[in-house]
Amino acid sequence: MTFPNPKLSRRHLLAASAAVVVAFSAASCTRGESPTPVPTPGGHRPSPSDPWRPVAHLTAEKNWLNDPNGLVYHAGTYHAFYQYNPRGNSWGNMSWGHSTSQDLVHWEQQPVAMEASLEEEVFSGCIVMDKDNASGLGSAETPPMVAIYTSAYGKNGPLPQGSQAQSVAFSLDDGTTWKKYQGNPVLNLAPTNNNFRDPKITWYEPGHYWVMTTVVADAQVVKLFKSTDLLHWEYLSDFSGVGAQGGLWEVPELLHMDVADSTTKKWVMLLSINPGGIAGGSGMQYFVGEFDGTRFTAENAAATDAPLNESQWLDHGADYYAANSISGAPGDKPVLLGWMGNWDYAQDVPTTPWRGSMAIPRELTLVRGAKRLELRSAIARVAHETLNHSGEVKSKNLTVGSSTMDLGPDFSGRTQVIELDMDLTSAREAGVLLRQSSASKDGLRISYNRESGGIRVDRSKAGTSNFSEKFSPFHEVAVPSPGSKVHLTILLDSSSVEVFAPVGTAVISDTFFPDWDNTGASAFSIEGETDFTVQSRSL
Ligand code: FRU
């Protein structure tokens, strides 16, 4: 199969108010330790000519990126490799780009790690440190960094054009240069290798072997394999027949996690689905269960014909996909990096010379919910500490009654972290408008409804959206026990927002493309009064 038109080929290939202000208490401003804005790699800051450039999220200086790949922490450095087109600003020539970070907020772009050739494109995969040199690809003194990726074969490859199989590459210089293994591919599903991709590896301590999860994407099957040397892989089992089925299953991962406040551990399967996600288009579901060394069995999983909201979702926004964990990351919680994109419109978004950004890294906790075990998400500790050391903190207490109130210049901006406490003492709904236009008063609307417990992000009047009919207008998730009080953590970064519900029960990650001049911020309260405490730190 050749891919002359990246868009078509990808689809083909991947199947593919009476304003009454009741009270207002004066603003209190505290100086942060470092009042300077976050410096960005290459000095990139949003500007009128590059208005949607994030400052606290990984982007490539130029060109297209999608899935994070090969996430590994090694010798004090976080490495993110990712699906990257070195030659253009849309999907194609899939290669592994590379960026590094010390704090998960500031990223330095490195040379392309593995570039597409006529023979193969380098699709998604993972990296592990082979510390005992079990693969023999390094030495005892210089253990190799081993990447397992999907070879998407073009002309003159070892498998027919259009096949996908798993291959190995290794680095002996901490991820700077890569050599492909001569015996590639190391794993295929002969006689057919259609849509067989996205290897991710986890160490299975009881059996002393590596376990790889992969997918046959269009069959909605996760396939598990094991190996002791990362080169020879033995089939273990299939996982299928539960959860959302409305699209391709992609980028699976098995995580072994502590259950909070207990001595129990459980296995969690992360799985991306496209289309068929909870917010439309691409989304990420997860399953909690047991893994016995051979087979993963999900517990309390939604049936395949169940409504989508019975499945468990990592994010309820439209732009969180292909997230996977950073191998070897310090701490006892998985740290995930996800792509802030949706295949429904990612190739049409109006950014240039770059397209695609990663989400803020998150850490996951597994807790007992009302009916079943659930994941909770928080901004990864290292990233949160970094964000907490940037900019200046401004805070304000105010009460708003059935009206919209300008928060004033201290709270306006394009890039900020906001801690928002709202007590809807008598209001039905309350929230904030960000990136607001001074003329029309439209903006990104983030709201909470006391009765339904629904947190909603409405991007329908937040900026340009005429690039795609599939750019969905708003996304909503209900908090488990609605009440009058709610706390939201909001990360606003030029062209994206990530809204964390109380105690991380849910996240809404959305991209949006506001006018450069729209920087206003307001608080609103509908049908009654709301007490607000707004704390903002500019980035
Ligand atoms: C997920 C995905 C993967 C594939 C990669 C290609 O977004 O479709 O399944 O490996 O992107 O870029």
Image (cartoon, rainbow, N blue to C red):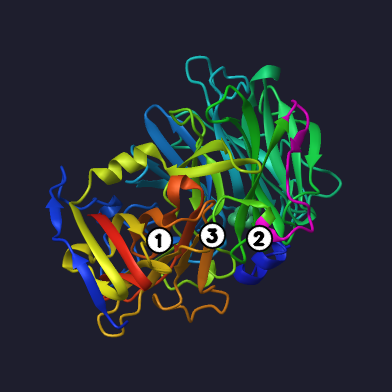
Element carrying mark 2: strand
The label shown at residue 497 is 1
Dot 3 or dot 1: first in sequence order is: 3
Residue position marked by numbered label 3 in the rendering:
477
Identity of the amino acid at label 1? Val
- Give the Cα separation between the discs numbered 2 and 1: 21 Å
Crowd rating for badge 2 (residues with CA inside 10 Å; few <14, some 14–19, many 20+): many
Dot 2 or dot 1: first in sequence order is: 2
| Residue in view at x 86 percent, y 46 percent | 191
Q: Would residue 459 be visible to someone looking at this image?
A: yes
- Give the Cα separation between the discs numbered 3 and 1: 15 Å
Magenta segment boundaries in residue numbering: 291-309
Where on the image, by quarter, is ligand 1? bottom right
Identity of the amino acid at label 3? Val
Q: Residue furthest top?
A: 140
Q: Residue furthest front?
A: 426
Identity of the amino acid at label 2? Asn
